[in-house]
Amino acid sequence: MKKFVFQSLWLFLLTSSCYLLLSLFTEPEIKETNDYLAAIIDKHERANSINEPRIIFMAGSSLAFGLNSEKIEKQFSIPVVNLALHGGVGLHFMLEELKSIIRKNDVVFLTVEYLLREDGDYGIKKLTSTFFPEASDYYNTNLKDEITIHLDRTRSHIEILLGHQMDKVQPSQIYFRKAFNKYGDVVSHLDKDPRIELNGRGEVPSRNWDRNNEMLNEFYNFALAKEASVFFIYPTYPLSEYNIYSEIIEKVKSKLSANLQIEIINQPEDLVFGDDMFFDTIFHLNQEGREKQTQKYIEFIQSNSNAMRSIERVRELLRNSDN
């Protein structure tokens, strides 16, 4: 029996050592990258380069593709940072990211897409933190997912070395780091023809929003302690999808209206656009849709007294700092 245990332990150690050596030799060095998710680096650099209070937008990729931040900055004469990147990171990640950035007198506009998951996709979060190590603080480490990702990555690298993956993935003309302008908006798609059929169609989950509300309210109280302002904006959505899931969206609205402490400054139907306003997915607006939504955002802010009070407070601070 002792011999069997010893042999099993020896085999385990030998296998583990071989895997560790293979992973070390096949693991490519991560250098400067043009990956879409690496844009988080540039977004944070912009946020940190602005010393005065800022207007900050946060959402999934719907707002990365759907906002003209320069126009909003010129409209309100306040520096704008668009932190929206990828819905795959999840709501928890986004809120923790905001916590790491917001300062006194910042004005935050937060959007939660209807299909956004609380915890997101672990692989997307892990890859994002590979490019931007600070992002590892925005989510909880999961050992099982870590092992799975490492095994898959090592196997893929071995296959590449052995020549089993000969076809190189062509770089995207839309989804890459330099697709963003200095404000954090995706602009690579503005001169491209939209897809005839939009991707990403799927059932809006009729899940319980209690956890979402709890997370959003916890962030709101954190922001209040920082003396920052926070407002909620319902997301854009194609008319064809809204017609299918309007009852579920109304339930979401009822749940948020009853429990969300963050002030909501629009209605779900306000940003329901025709499908011809979208670019490649049900979340990403084309150039025309982007300009339409940007104008709507300006109108939402201007028509809300509390949002304008926050905006005016920042303007006054900026005017005083110039004198």
Image (cartoon, rainbow, N blue to C red):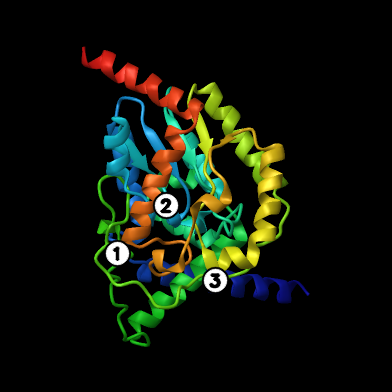
Q: Quadrant of the N terminus?
A: bottom right
Q: Quadrant of the C terminus?
A: top left
Does residue 262 sit above or below 131 in this rendering? Answer: above
Foreground residue among 7 and 106 = 106
Of the residues shown, which amino acid type is indicated by label 3? Arg
Q: Could you tell me if the residues under marks 2 and 1 are in contact, i.e. CB atoms within 8 Å?
A: no
Q: Earlier in the sequence, mark 3 or mark 1?
A: 1
Residue at image coords 42%, 43%: 297
Q: Which mark is residue 25?
A: none
Of the residues shown, which amino acid type is indicated by label 2? Leu
Label 1 crowding class (10 Å Cα cut-off): few <14, some 14-19, many 20+?
Answer: some
Of the residues shown, which amino acid type is indicated by label 1? His
93 to the left or right of 285: right
For mark 2, what is the residue?
63
Q: Earlier in the sequence, mark 3 or mark 2?
A: 2
Label 3 crowding class (10 Å Cα cut-off): few <14, some 14-19, many 20+?
Answer: some
Foreground residue among 302 and 13 = 302
For mark 3, what is the residue?
201
For mark 1, what is the residue?
189
Label 2 crowding class (10 Å Cα cut-off): few <14, some 14-19, many 20+?
Answer: many
Q: Splitting the image into 4 quarters, where does residue 33 fall? A: bottom left
In 3D space, how far apart are the residues under numbered discs 3 and 2 (Cα atoms)?
Answer: 17 Å
Foreground residue among 168 and 304 = 304
Q: Say what secondary structure mark 3 lies in.
A: loop
Q: Could you tell me if the residues under marks 3 and 1 are in contact, i.e. CB atoms within 8 Å?
A: no
- The x, y position of residue 247, in whole percent, is 69, 59
